[in-house]
Image (tube, grey):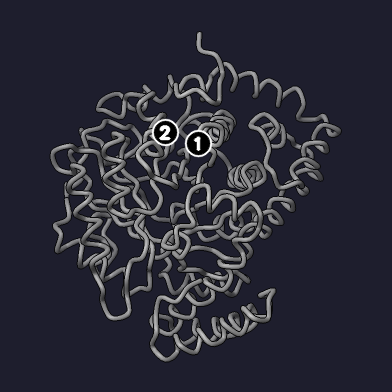
Amino acid sequence: MYKYDPKSLKAEEFINDEEIQATLAYADENKDNLELVDQILEKAKLRKGLSHREASVLLACEDEKKNAEIYDLAEQIKKDFYGTRIVMFAPLYLSNYCVNGCLYCPYHAINKTIPRKKLTQEEVRQEVIALQDMGHKRLAIESGEDPINNPIEYILECIKTIYSVKHKNGAIRRVNVNIAATTVENYRKLKEAGIGTYILFQETYHKDSYEVLHPTGPKHNYAYHTEAMDRAMEGGIDDVGIGVLFGLDKYRYEFAGLLMHAEHLEAVHGVGPHTISVPRVKKADDIDPTAFDNSLSDEMFCKIAACIRIAVPYTGMIISTRETPEVREKIIRLGVSQISGGSRTSVGGYTEEERPHDTEQFDVSDHRTLDEVVNWLMRAGYIPSFCTACYREGRVGDRFMSLCKSGQIQNCCHPNALMTLKEYLVDYASEDTRKIGEALIEKEIENIGKDSIKEVVRKELKKIEGGKRDIYF
């Protein structure tokens, strides 16, 4: 029998089924205990986070008034740590060759209907140019697991190509990597290649379900997959991003497991997840999401995001174009700090005039262009940020987290967001977006606390108008 231990390096001890079951029972027993709910909310207001058990009580609570308090607190905590900035990124699919048999992904090995494609380095270059022409500065590269077609050497070569492409005023300044669990040695190679965050979704923390959903291929190994972040950090990667694919198993189980994983990383490495993603199962090629009977409502999906924000206040939270514009609008308010825009989830999709569907990993629900997303965010009062300064200045890992937790990161991030937005407005924006953006920047300069920094920002903005690029604190 495995015993729960957040400091253990064994998957079934830091993600312990017995502890999760006890947590869910505790949450059921106390979901109507408003006195306890109030105590948990008071603790949450200290901005130090909550345990998986405390957060599970909030998630289970059905009292409308308390839920309103949860949403308001989540919104305030997000503002305290990240302001109104929303970091922009795009996924870049390199290859859909895959040897795994994952039942929820159309890249699975036995799918004979999907065309298999792998980008050449010239095709990578053309995809990057297309993304730069939109205005993107940050990418998350994605690839199926295939040791023959997509070995680590191929991934490393693609990263080198991406960073090498300078087109007009375009440059990709941060490459995050979402590839299969691998070895410490390979994580060291990714670190040396200059990646930003290493991202790996658990898919499901329920071991029995995990093994059923991954019947064949190396991903079938639950422990190897679940312990990947420990190997990544051992390999020198400073920032890791976790997440589950909501809908595969019971959402309350996944929620508790996700928070336990965050607690484990903090306990062992002194730094929790840089990001937490909250994707949901979506239709794609031969995948029917209704085949999974654990779907959750938009309302509960938003509540999960709010409770994650309260429980892990320092983490970046990511929502993708899997979700509709309406859901993205609701969930951003409750804690999301990063979103994709203008995304295409097919291999080679950005160089195609019409959005291709034959190699998509999932159906995109938000089809707006990057410019339309930027315009929408600004109209809603947010600052679209293309900033990558922390990564390039070495404000990563525990250094980033200490700055974030103390609130000092705002002194860098707010000005940097405005300067990268200015770059976007000058180089890529439509006339309407530029007009809205210029007014927003002028307004937001006044929200910079120090007059000396205000003056510096105004001078740097003038330099950007004059053609200078990549200015940051």
Type of the residue with mark 1: His
Callout 1: few (<14), some (14-19), or many (20+) C-alpha neighbours within 10 Å? Answer: some
For the residues labelled 1 and 2, the Cα–Cα distance comes to 8 Å
* Numbered badge on residue 269: 1
**On screen, 343 above or below 68?**
below
Image point 48% across, 80% down: which residue? 422
Looking at marks 1 and 2 on the same chain, the residue that comes earlier in the sequence is marked by 2
Q: Is residue 463 left or right of residue 285?
A: right
Residue 294 rendering spot, x and y as whole percentages: 51, 32
Q: Is disc 1 in contact with disc 2, using a CB cutoff of under 8 Å?
A: yes
Q: Nearer the viewer, residue 451 or 350?
A: 451
Image point 55% across, 57% down: which residue? 337
The answer to whether residue 251 of the structure is visible from this angle is no
* Numbered badge on residue 230: 2
Q: Residue at the top extreme?
A: 1
Q: Secondary structure at mark 2?
A: helix
Residue 258 rendering spot, x and y as whole percentages: 53, 35
The answer to whether residue 382 of the structure is visible from this angle is yes
Q: Residue at the right extreme?
A: 35
Tell which tag, 1 or 2, sits nearer the viewer. 1
Residue 75 rendering spot, x and y as whole percentages: 69, 55
Q: Is residue 393 left or right of residue 149?
A: right
Residue 450 rendering spot, x and y as whole percentages: 68, 76
**On screen, 431 above or below 421?**
below
**On screen, 52 above or below 162?**
above
Q: Quadrant of residue 370?
A: bottom left
Callout 2: few (<14), some (14-19), or many (20+) C-alpha neighbours within 10 Å? Answer: some
Image point 26% across, 73% down: which residue? 166
Type of the residue with mark 2: Asp
Q: Secondary structure at mark 1?
A: helix
